[in-house]
Amino acid sequence: MVNFVVSKPENRFGFALYDFLEEVDSSSLLLSDGVADLNYGDIFQTLKKGFITETFDGIDYMITPNSFFQSNSEMALQMYRKILSLTRGRTLDLYSGVGSISLFAASAADSVTGVEVVQEAVDVAERNRENNEIENVNFICADAAAYVKENTGKFDTLILDPPRGGMEQKMLKYINEMAPERIIYMSCNPVTCRDDLKLLEGYNIDFLEAYDMFPQTPHVETLTLLTKK
């Protein structure tokens, strides 16, 4: 998938490169008038098929231009397999995106609830669930902190994959009140992960592993398992 983010509808940049994209399955023109975060935008024109499909251990994921999905598929699959081995019981997956972790972990859980604030991502996640015929997963469009505040004590396993900036203070407070038996924390920022873990009360760090998602760069993904003391 190759997407072109432009500021004006009349921009012909994507069309000019169209003939050079023979090996690309999906390509779109996205509109954004911002000066940062230019990997997303409103879809203005689909140059080729509007999605791609990634398959992890028999689970097919439809990925659209504005979907978040790990770009290093080989390393992501290793992380997902580890998450699967750590998942137990009633599971809550926060920041669930297109449902990649929720659906992969479903076979180890009694049930999985995925919570995501972006409706487009929730719609894609639901399509992925239906296409894979997975029955014990449901997706909810909601603010993650608000959902946790209203649903304390209902889950055994909490899966977290927050943005690079980490979690809000109120989210950490609500997680402490929820007090799940285990927390699986996936982070793309070791610094904010460290800061967040310090504020999660009453847990032991049972497992911590780093994954080199972007070799030869400073970026690393970490996976941590916390269990109640």
Image: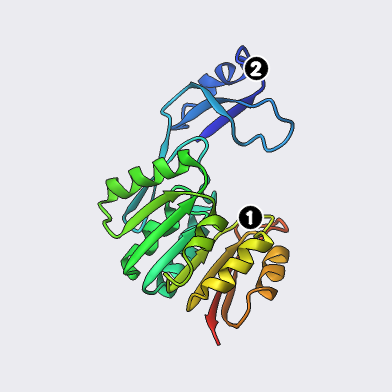
Q: Residues within 10 Å of mark 2 (few under 14, many from 20)?
A: few
Query: Residue pushed farthest top?
Result: 10
Question: Is 201 situated left or right of 141 in this image?
Answer: right
Query: Residue pushed farthest bottom?
Result: 229
Query: Residue pushed farthest front?
Result: 150
Q: Do the residues labelled 1 and 2 touch (CB within 8 Å)?
A: no
Q: Is residue 118 above or below residue 55?
A: above
The label nearer to you, 1 versus 2, is: 2
Q: What element carries label 1?
A: loop
Question: Is 221 situated left or right of 22 in this image?
Answer: right
Q: Is residue 69 above or below residue 28?
A: below
Sequence-first disc among 1 and 2: 2
Give the residue number, with chain letter if any, for mark 2: 8
Res. 53 visible in picture: no
Residue at figure coordinates x 47%, y 79% from the top left? 181
Give the residue number, with chain letter if any, for mark 1: 214
- Residue 23 position in % (x across, y down): 46, 31
**Amino acid under disc 1:** Phe
The image quarter containing residue 206 is: bottom right
Q: Quadrant of the C terminus?
A: bottom right
- Residue 91 position in % (x across, y down): 41, 67
Q: Residue 96 carries which label?
A: none
- Residue 74 position in % (x across, y down): 49, 57
Residue at figure coordinates x 66%, y 55% from the top left? 164
**Amino acid under disc 2:** Lys
Q: How far apart are marks 1 and 2 (CA)?
A: 32 Å
